[in-house]
Amino acid sequence: MLPLATRVRRVSSQLRRTETAPHAFRKPTNHGIVRKLAMWLQHHTESGGVSMTEKVSIKTVAELKTWVGKEVAVGNWITVTQPMIDKFAEASGDFQWIHVDVERCKTESPFKTTIAHGNLTFCLLSSIARNADVDLPPSKMSVNYGSNKIRYTGIVPVGSKIRGRYKLLEVKDVDDKTVLVSWGVTGEIEGGQKPVLIAETLSRRSA
């Protein structure tokens, strides 16, 4: 069976062709069913139920290097819940009321609801391996090596859906078995026009 993303594109293409072709050359088509299917697919794509990105499988470090400067994957949508925010507050010690006091936020916060910690947003979106449907070259060990840049460019109200977009910036040889990989991470919020996170993360991968 063809990948779902391919089938989505074919349905959309069929709909466009049947609507623009001269009447005499149109094939009989149940436009109502095709249109409803296209609308359903669009809705589930936008809500995160269907990924339009084909899975990327990168088998070697040499192949990984050919992706430098390109977007490798788009992550799955993650819903930010209040229990998630509360657990992060406990782990980090950051109990500022704009994150954890639901009732106070209703009356005093300009956002009228709690918002996620910036560091929580970063933690949720920083890893391509956790969040995206992608296979990276096999390694015996991969460790977080830090970040070159982290900018929190938007708020994430509780209940929001967020996802990351991952661009490979650099693959640098450390030794014969280890590479230092730099990723550009852009955090998106469902329905938003601007990113909520812009970051450059580093990881070491050892064969």
Image (spheres, rainbow, N blue to C red):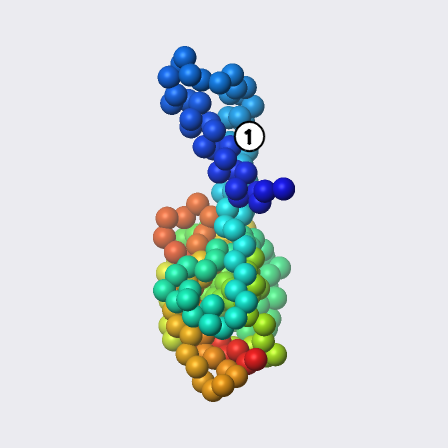
Q: How crowded is mark 1: few (under 14 residues within 10 Å), some or many (20 or more)?
A: some
Against 83, is 119 above or below?
below
**Kind of residue at disc 1:** Leu
Residue that carries the numbered disc 1 in the rendered image: 37
> Is the C terminus in the top left, top right, bottom left or bottom right quadrant?
bottom right
| Residue 183 place in picture, x, y as percent | 43, 68
**Which residue is found at the position 50% from the left and 50% from the top?**
53
Which of the pair 180/85 is nearer the observer?
Answer: 180
The residue sitting at the top extreme is: 24
Taking the view exactly as shown, the residue that stands out farthest to the bottom is 175
> Does 154 sit above or below residue 38?
below
Element under disc 1:
helix
| Image coords of residue 154 (percent x, y) | 39, 58
Q: Of residues 123 and 69, which is closer to you in this image?
A: 69
Q: Which of 36 and 152 is in front in this view?
A: 36
Residue depicted at x 51% and y 32% = 11
Residue at (54% x, 61% y) in the render = 57
Could one spot residue 152 in this view of the protein?
Answer: no
| 174 on left or right of 135 | left
**Count the marks: how many?**
1
Is any part of residue 37 visible from this angle? yes
Quadrant (top left, top right, bottom left, bottom right) of the N terminus: top right
The image position of residue 181, as x and y in percent, is: 45, 74
Residue at x 36% of width, y 52% of height:
194
State which quadrant residue 33 falls in.
top right
**Image coordinates for residue 156, horizontal then vertical, percent:** 46, 56
Picture quadrant of residue 129 = bottom right
